[in-house]
Amino acid sequence: MADTSREPAKVIQDDATDWVIRVDRGLSDEDQSALDAWLAADVRHQGAFARAQALWMESNRARIFRGSGKSESYSAGTDTPSRSRGASKRPMALAASFLLLILGATWGWQWWVAGRFSTSVGEIRRIALPDGSVVTLDTDSTIQVDYGKQGRIVKLSQGVALFDVAHDPHRPFIVEAGSLRVRAVGTSFIVRHLEEPSAEVTVTRGVVDVWQEVTVPEPSIRMKAGLRLAATKHTVGPPQSMTEEQISRATAWQNGIINLDGRFLEEAAEEFNRYNELKIHVDPSLARQSVVGRFSVNDPRSFTTAAAAMLGARVSIEGSELKLEPRVQ
Amino acid sequence: MQNLSSDRARWLIANIMPLEPLLRSWLRRVKPAGLEVDDLIQEAYAKMAALPSVEHIAQPKPYLFQIVKSLILIHLRHSQVVPIESMAEIGDVELSIEEGSPERIFSGRQQLEHLMCVIDGLPSGCRQVFELRKFEDLSQREIAAKLGIAESTVEKQLARALRLLFQRFVDAPTRATPAAAGHKQSPIDRDAQDG
């Protein structure tokens, strides 16, 4: 039964808030004992402290939406010379005036651009978006572009795409691939989303934030150029650094080239099959053999011929299938 | 319980905090004798922070209400007089939840967008310090050095920011515009400005 001498909940909440900030600053031994005593004194203290800690810890995730249409309040602040966005103010102003010029010609795109782009098997397509960003779509890929007040949202429903993103801190550029989210500010990166629910992000220039959005956004992981990260439905792997070779291999498809540097034959065949109706079928006994070389994506015949020569195998054509089999002894 | 794991923090913010308005309105209707709504909410948070795991909780809403219901029963058992109607009303908890006021449970995205609006609406001084701490990841000491202010001022501003976030994001979870949030003067605003 509550008695009237009980401490009001409001007071407890304010005390809890103060404690959270003190913990964030760092506690002396003395502070620590005081906090322990305070927590032990009342179960409500523990609850209020947990609640305040939760909000404190989670509030940095709101950064994902920094700049989503709330720009007035930044530029109005003359008292914030030290914030990092201050450094980029001048280029931003230039960009803004440029946008205004175009705005007259292409009525209102700035707020609303939407469309669906896709490539068929074997096609690689470069799409220039109205903000200056360029998307290169790999074979058999589909994106849905949705530029609105909330930001620039591109949904990669299937396939592989390379994004060269024009810098605009006011409107975040977010790629959605399954439940994976990648947010970019002036950068270049590749998202592979070949089959649900897995996706992979490779950053070739700049910095991106990656997070998973299943029911709620997870905390984001910051990725720099030269890093790759793979995700499944519920997990996001740690970013792995890539060698120069791996990066050039990851971007080679833009130029219609498949660069194999010791990949398994079955993986290489899978890669070619993404681009061609003529499918390569690899005999299981050869699947784990390694192959090297640079090949044109739309020339699976040259590849199979070269692979056969490398591995001492033979090639046969059956219908729309190129078969790689061990040479019969 | 002192160090809430980041997983638990996320779970509480995503699953429990959005249910607070619903829980409050239910508690105000049930009016458990002699018990304060906010006390019960704090106790419920203590319980949920202390759970060894929350993975088994598929449906946070009935779970939260069950916890609050058991807290009420414990309090009532300890009190001398147990009003019959209290027990009856509490028995109806499942029904009441379903017919409850329209839920304002935002999706994760909306929740964070709204939080960002509230942060944008913080008074400029405390917003700056808050953003340097949370978005730029500077320590309190580094912020003090960078802005040339005392560490105690940084601490005070952060505490003020967090209190305002509670008022505007949790306690009044309407989707305030940033302008409205910025102009609304709360008692804490005035306190801090006087200080």
Image: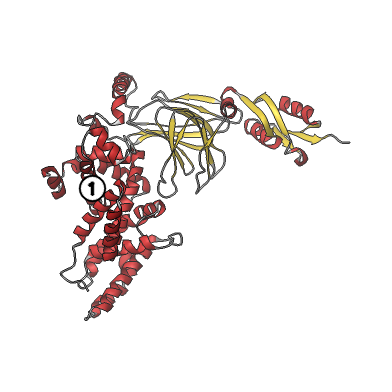
Q: Quadrant of the N terminus of chain B?
A: bottom left
What is the image's colouring?
A: secondary structure
Where in the figure is residue A245, as x and y percent of width and height?
Answer: 60, 27
Identify whether B92 is placed above or below A141. Answer: below
Q: Determine if residue A134 is in view.
A: yes
Q: Taking B192 as reference, is B63 left or right?
A: right
**Quadrant of the rendered structure where residue A253 is?**
top right
Residue lying at the far left of the rendered structure = B194
Q: Taking A240 as reference, is B45 left or right?
A: left
Identify whether B14 is placed above or below A92. Answer: below
Where in the figure is residue A317, as x and y percent of width and height?
Answer: 77, 31
Q: Chain of mark 1?
A: B
**Quadrant of the rendered structure where residue B3 is?**
bottom left
Residue at 23%, 71% (x, y): give it.
Answer: B32
Residue lying at the far right of the rendered structure = A329
Out of B18 and B49, give the one closest to the viewer. B49
Residue at 40%, 53% (x, y): give it.
Answer: B5
Out of A255 and B118, give the one closest to the viewer. B118
Q: Determine if residue A319 is in view.
A: no
Out of A276 and B177, give the one closest to the viewer. B177
Q: Quadrant of the C terminus of chain B?
A: top left
The amino acid at mark 1 is Ala
**Quadrant of the rendered structure where residue B11 is?**
bottom left
Numbered disc 1: secondary structure: helix
Where in the figure is residue A323, as x and y percent of width and height?
Answer: 76, 34
Where in the figure is residue B105, as x and y percent of width and height?
Answer: 32, 53
Q: How dense is the environment of label 1, judged by Cα within 10 Å: few (below 14), some, or many (20 and up)? A: many
The residue to which callout 1 is attached is B159
